Image: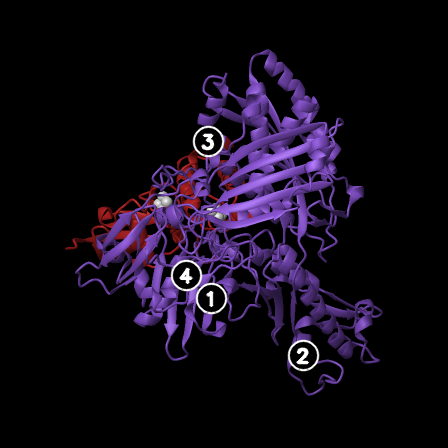
Amino acid sequence: MTYTSSIGIRVNGEVVEREVEDRLTLADFLRNELRLTGTHLGCEQGSCGACTVLVDGSAIRSCLTFASQLNGAEVTTVEGLASEEDLHPLQSAFLRNDALQCGFCTPGFLLTAAEILSETNDLDEGTIREAISGNICRCTGYQGIIDAIVEVARSGSER
Amino acid sequence: MKAEEFVRGQGRYLADLPDQDCLHVAFVRSPHAHAKIGEIRAPKSSALITMCTGVDLLADINPFRVVAPGHLDYEWYPLAHDRALFVGEPVAAVVAKTPYIAEDLAAEVEVEYDPLEAVTNLDESMAGETVLHAQLENNILFNLSVNEGATTDTFAAAHLVVEQEFEYPRQNALPLETRGVLARFDPRDQRYTVFTSTQIPHLIRSALSQILNVNEDAIRVIKPDVGGGFGLKGQLFPEEVVLPALARKLGHPLKWIEDRRESLIAGGHAHEERLHLSAAFDADGALLATKSLIDGDSGAHSTFPFGAGLDPLTGALNIFGAYRHKTAEFTARAFASNKAPAVSYRGVGQIQSVFAVERLMDIAADRLKMDPAELRKRNLYTKSEFPVTSPGGNEFDTGAYRETLEIALDRADYQGLRREQETARREGRLYGIGLATFNEVSGVSIFGYDGASIRIDPDGQVKAFLSTGSSGQGHEKVYGRLVAEAIGISPELVQVLEGDTDFCPVGAGTYASRSMVTTGNLLESAARELRDKILMIGGLLLSPDGLIPLEHVNNELLIADGVISLVRDPTATVTFEAVAQLAHMKDFNFSLPQELVQAGLESTHYEQHKTVYSNSSAVAAVEIDPETAQLSIRRCVIIGDCGRIFDPPTVDAQLVGGAAMGLGCALFEHLRYDDNGQILTASLMDYLVPVSTDIPQFEIGHLETPSTFSANGTKGMGEGGTMAIPAVLANAVADALMEKGLLLNKIPLSEEYIFQLLRTV
Ligand code: FES
Ligand code: FES
């Protein structure tokens, strides 16, 4: 017996209405139903942060959230950060600072960082280190990621 | 650009491939470490499309033998059909419409197990009361001794002999992207297409051709974007066989994505070893002879292509490699146990041996009453001594080992750190300084040849095809630049293609820090060859006297930014694109004199590369809280020498990222089993890897001593940072603990272990 719910949510600005199985995770909904495969799954146990997306502005783990809980929510994934031509400042800073190698963790870090920066630009390296400590990167050693976020925070506070 | 695709979330990893027409596979895995398999009953559900057991699969595949020198070979099957040999070993596969349903059904499969005694550690395996493989007499899967007895006299006459046993734990490379396979079989052309998240596409194809009993040509292996490999994705896994075999049988494409639990229990373990080392010194501290016994716990199976001996043999072949000494003997063995099979993980074999050797050097320094830095300097090869042949017969072309250590000591202000230590000790603080210095084997080509091929299209678009395969190291960027620079054109024209056996030259793939050394060199040769030809055609168009012979093209012609010109008359130019066009198609005014220049712009180079050795030195300073045993890393300097540096940011990224991984290996990473062979670390809550707050500021630097074995002067650079950290931190912690530190002989340096050392009386 499978139970379903109908949901209407806004994903990267577009309204989507679907009938979903109650046990379908937000991550699988985004990836399989909407083909937004930029949200990655590294553990499905809530431990790695690769699946991080923004729900109503807060960074959440889409592997631990059911799509059916999100009726009426506003979801932002990595695909919603850039426009066709312009990268989001965080994306450009990640490129400039060698903040990625294999890129698998990158979407999760970008959205985690987007949440941090939406709250304040008054960030030093230590605060950023702390704030991203729920996300795992196996390639970079984190330094480039931290440098990139520091750079965006600085340019934001100058503005 | 790859990196831009990645930040946009447009990477195409295995799980992202189009799969609308796929059915999904889930595996039924043994909950027992060792058990006889009885009847397997499929769930009675209309949602079940099929179930395939190990016995069912026997009809469709050939048994497979991992044949390598020193290895005892036996038949390997992707699904256990008679006995399950470790928790997590796949015993059946179920197919359903969605992954959710497949997983539900896999949980409902009933398997009758008859549990047997489990072998869970080296001692039990050596005792051999339970033998895992019926085809073998004991649990030794690999055994090789070299120079047995050769050091006996030197040891007997030596001023000092130090001897110590060390233990290194079982670890998992943990790429953030788990493995996955998507397999198709096309009945019209009788071909398999196997997408797999791997580092070794061609070796997978060769193995599958034997197992599936078809020609290599009937299999296309494609590696999509890979979210990290670190060695783990450098072997053949059961799922890579089961999916294509079932896809053919069902006439349906199939997909399987490993979950993290599967990955931690069955996706390949590494590094677990016990090392027993002895070293003989004279009264001045000169190293005379070494003797090493390395025993690896290789889990249930010998895996393809490296076999069970991978870790112990790699360690033994290169042990004490940076230190001058006359004689050495070693034995490397691998034992079977009821644990997941051992595969490779960055730092293969050497992360353990470097830790053990560097600990032994510190113990020797203590006994000789010498400063550890002095003892190392006395024994490290210096620049002027190269080329060197090690007592084990390894050839080192170039190096500057002592010099690398001196730079590291300087950078860390070693004397200053020692003064700081004195102050700290007076205040009752536990402050320690550690050193580590070693050379690292790279560019290993045990499977023969690698290839690189360049094809230039009539419109001047350049495609480079390689036998190596990036798993996130940035090959596309580095190789693109390399080709562009060698030809003299914009990197934007160059596309780098790896990991598709239908297009790429045959070769061994990417592991052992080998890509830049192997295909990097080949690519450069191919690009140079094409540049010469492009210049020659340019010469035909520009030079009034017509043909400029190949030997002279580089003196008489230039190519820069895609424009070819005559040296003696720079106003006469022709574009690279125009030459590319005329190399393929004639026009009204010009056709190639074919007796002199063959049409087309393509070049392919193959070779087997010689092994090259990089080296690194590290200095760390740590402080330990005497109450809580908490470890704080105050300084960590790593200086690497990987020969010529082609792309500094990529080298830095490998060094720092590698060091972060080494930090995990040194401090937390430990796959644990209980006495019954149940794995205790099946989630990221139990198997810990470093997060941002764990990483100290690594201070890195380079020395460039170009290799003479590789035409481009490079040596491998992917693993030095990783290998350095367990050794350097172990020595720093031991130094902080003073006499108690002399007992330190184990990794990981968990707070629990440090606490235990602190409390010893
Ligand atoms: S996949 Fe969600 S936290 Fe790892
Ligand atoms: S870039 Fe590979 S995991 Fe972060």
Q: Nearer the viewer, mark 1 or mark 2?
A: 1
Give chain A's shade. red
Same chain for mark 3 and mark 2? The answer is no
Q: Looking at the image, is mark 1 or mark 2 earlier in the sequence?
A: 1
Which residue bears the numbered disc 3? A127
Q: Residues within 10 Å of mark 2 (few under 14, many from 20)?
A: many
Asked whether the viewer can see residue B613, the reply is: yes
Same chain for mark 1 and mark 4? The answer is yes
Q: Are marks 1 and 4 in contact (CB under 8 Å)?
A: no
Structure colour scheme: by chain
In the picture, the disc for residue B351 is none
Q: Secondary structure at mark 2?
A: helix
Same chain for mark 3 and mark 4? The answer is no
Same chain for mark 1 and mark 2? The answer is yes
| Gap between marks 3 and 4 measured at Cα | 43 Å
Please give the name of the residue rendered at 30% of the width and 70% of the height, measured from the top-left corner: B250
Residue B77 or B83: which is nearer the viewer?
Answer: B83
Which residue bears the numbered disc 2? B583
Residue B530 or B103: which is nearer the viewer?
Answer: B103
Q: Nearer the viewer, mark 1 or mark 3?
A: 1
Asked whether the viewer can see residue B654, the reply is: no
Check disc 2 and give the amino acid type.
Answer: Ala
Q: Secondary structure at mark 1?
A: strand
Q: Are marks 1 and 3 in contact (CB under 8 Å)?
A: no
Q: Position of residue B200 (x, y in %)?
A: 51, 59
Check disc 3 and give the amino acid type.
Answer: Thr
Which residue bears the numbered disc 4? B240
| Gap between marks 4 and 2 measured at Cα | 42 Å
Check disc 4 and give the amino acid type.
Answer: Glu
